[in-house]
Image: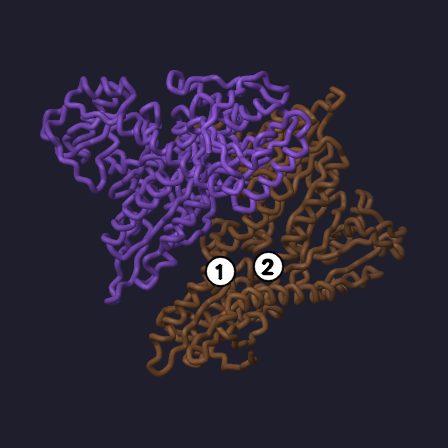
Chain colours: A brown, B purple
Amino acid sequence: MTQKSRKQTKKETADQDEVVTFHYDKVKDFSTWFTEINKSAELSDQRYGVKGLVVFRSWTTVTLKIMYRLLEEELERYGHLPFIFPALVPESNLVKEAQHVEGFSPEVFWCTRAGADTIFEEPLALRPTSESAMYPLYSLWIRSWRDLPFKRYQSVAIWRYDTKMTRPFLRGREFYWIEAHNVFATVEEAEAQVLEDLEITKTFVEGDLAMPVIVLKRPQWDKFPGAVYTVAAESLLPNGRFIQNGTTHMLGENFARAYDVKYVDENEQEQYANQTCFGPGISRMYGAMIIMHGDNDGLILPFVLAPVQVVIIPIPKKGLKEVVIERCRKLEAQLRKAGLRVHFDNTERRPGDKYYHWEMRGVPLRLEIGNREVQDNTVTIFRRDIRTRETVPDKKLVKKVKETGKFVTDELRKRAQAHFDGAIQDANSFEEICEIMESQKVARINFCTLEMEGLACAEKIKDATGADIRGTKLGEQEKPWGLCPLCDKPGTVVAYVGKQY
Amino acid sequence: MTQKSRKQTKKETADQDEVVTFHYDKVKDFSTWFTEINKSAELSDQRYGVKGLVVFRSWTTVTLKIMYRLLEEELERYGHLPFIFPALVPESNLVKEAQHVEGFSPEVFWCTRAGADTIFEEPLALRPTSESAMYPLYSLWIRSWRDLPFKRYQSVAIWRYDTKMTRPFLRGREFYWIEAHNVFATVEEAEAQVLEDLEITKTFVEGDLAMPVIVLKRPQWDKFPGAVYTVAAESLLPNGRFIQNGTTHMLGENFARAYDVKYVDENEQEQYANQTCFGPGISRMYGAMIIMHGDNDGLILPFVLAPVQVVIIPIPKKGLKEVVIERCRKLEAQLRKAGLRVHFDNTERRPGDKYYHWEMRGVPLRLEIGNREVQDNTVTIFRRDIRTRETVPDKKLVKKVKETGKFVTDELRKRAQAHFDGAIQDANSFEEICEIMESQKVARINFCTLEMEGLACAEKIKDATGADIRGTKLGEQEKPWGLCPLCDKPGTVVAYVGKQY
């Protein structure tokens, strides 16, 4: 096994099928980089013609489907079952929980008529989230302590009329998520579910998506409308912005009282149920993952998520074409049989153009098969993440590919972790907070309180920097070391301050 | 291996968790049977509160997901890639193809406003089907003959404001389907795609769903709005009604001209593309499958579609409880390891109640494990379809379960085929057509023409019987043997007449 440095040819002139235009700097000009990677790697199309609605192209959709499958399997392993509720929710359902309707009303798409002349007596909301659709039926289904715990999820699109700037995947008016809605007899069980949800999110995001996760309990002013409290599993993008991978809401009895979700306990007493809901955003996590791992040559995809995990490129010279092609086909069959997603690029384009095409799309591994590889019974494996080559005996191919694929994901995780660790800085004054925000990092501060009384301090930061109090670390109980730099009251919590998508 | 007749105990009184109420006659009172099976087997819930919108419960959803996976894999095997378009379609897109908008306008749900006070300048349709959403972007994506064929699908919900009577799965206002939208250079390739779609449907429906399929080319008056022609893969329910599993539409250049989908051919000439679209209805097929195979004890599910393929019921007597439970756990682990969906029902209910519960839900195989099975190292397998038991050495368990599971599906297919074959009867007069419709069967008749001139004859049948001319067999070119019994003109085609869902 030798490390080689075969000359990289990706910036060669492309043939007429391939427009070679990608040379954007992710760090210096993130916004352009993200717009252009969406076009060049064919991730989404923003020309659909309605603000905030984009088309998810095939390269994206294959990965979204893999993400759905992995996370659904995980939820089912933890005892959830799938179901599907209608997308249209009667207005009268939505208004039952006062804070909930107040929170979501400004964002609801309303369906008001059908056909040529049917006006609905009651408008129907396009689900912005499904508590108000589901819980009236939970009230019918749940009767006794024997029906609990009741753990269900659905994988659906939701619609929110977001008036902020939209961006593919990160912030749009239609997005894809999973929503799990669970019911328990006791507060303790519900609290345990909140932790379980976060564990599921962490395992999935840190494992498969290779993104570090910080779990924050949100301030009271930033909780889910109607919830007792909200916790979020967040990642930190290279531009210093938080992205919420998923949130879990402790609903307590709030919704149970509004929607009459009760059960008869073991002593024949009627009780309100305790509820939680959990909403991992699949399309949003995808966007975060693209941004987290991509570089100036395009995407880099974690191995388990790549639509094509291994691309095979033939590099035949001097009359050995058929032998090389034959060899590539054999390798393709061998890898496919081993359960890998493999693509043999046998088009007429030049190898350099093929390299470029598949690097742009983030294919983790490339097999380069030329005359030398055929003669030596070897395979040259190129790693997209660190751009190195290794030549291995072809007998070891499958094992080596699986192992190297895992190394790619590990390397991506390591890089993201390094960025994450370097991004969090303690601040002891308002000026320091502003400086840290200016430098696209996250500030860790002493803060007066995450109860409603702290909102005024949070608003001072927001007004000056556009950043939010994202919350306090769940579980760890970090100890404040001084006064709140906004109001000079003693810090009761350590809070994290950052901008968000 | 011996056939045994252990006494069936399913109609014993149930414990308080289990309400034993199912005793409806599917043949004599289909409508009640279907309503009650929806409740008792927890398939759907009609108490959602909006006409035509039902909740798909977990037992249904697990199977829908399996169906999606199987059919998507098949589509991908034939070169389709997934993508996702927004659910909201601007009105101006929809009106571009004149027949299309005329056909769908009466059924569109319109989204007209958002939040408290935003009225949309242009109303947005909830996708009733996605031609008008997709083809404007096809027009941008497809440039050259090198981009063709272009084969894509999405798996989504659609909404149609159907004013007829709604029924769970069969006819509703929100349903789940796959829609594949393909583009070709030539008419011939598009025609070949129509046949490929039908082949995919037949393989899936006849194989996995165990329902015979007849492929009919629809009359011109019953084609998809905007299409050149429409073909349908239909099954025939026990009550004599046709159910459309999926339709494929030959669009020719009609939509390409409306949405400007063009390509430059190999001679540098600009050409309109030829298109097809294909819409297998997942939730509708599920409903058909439930109805086709169920009996008066509940559902019977084909083996590959059952959420639980094998249920294990312990029947311990006289102090051997722990040994029996231990044995059940071992068998469960063994079957799970073999990739089977297995459930060990270790609740406190009596065996008879468990039998009833899982038979109602259509679990194909049940393992009964009692003292005798433990002592003899055997397993007793009960088949839901023919209600027989077989005792096998436990060493052969996995092989035997897989084989018996296949036998269940085969038996269901055989029964459905026998019904199908017996349901089609030749009719030579208007009276005979009426009699056949009366007896809940399908009439095979000579018919004047499926072009628009034949509509008057079709309407005579519709007025008298409520039945439709469903079309003529695709490919087979059946030879008419006489005059059209409606207008006495010579029959140019053999047409099938039946009622539909």
Residue B25: % across, % down:
42, 17
- Three-letter amino acid code at the position of disc 1: Ala
Q: What residue sits right under mark 1 in the picture?
A: A338
Which quadrant would residue A238 be assigned to in this image? bottom right
Figure check: B187 above or below A371: above
Chain of the residue where label 2 is placed in the rendered structure: A
Specify whether B377 is left or right of A336: right
Residue B427: image location, x then y, percent: 18, 23
Hey, what amino acid is under mark 2? Met
Q: What residue is disc 2 on?
A: A289
**What is the secondary structure assignment of the residue under circle 1?**
loop
Q: What residue is shown at x 28% (from left), y 36% (from top)?
A: B214
Instruction: Note whether A462 is above or below B482 in the view shown.
Output: below
Left-right relation of B347 to A485: left
| Residue B190 visible here | yes
Find out whether the residues at labels 2 and 1 contact each other: C-beta distance under 8 Å: no
Judge by depth and name the residue closer to the eye, B494 or A175: B494
Q: Mark 2 against mark 1, which lies toward the viewer?
A: 1
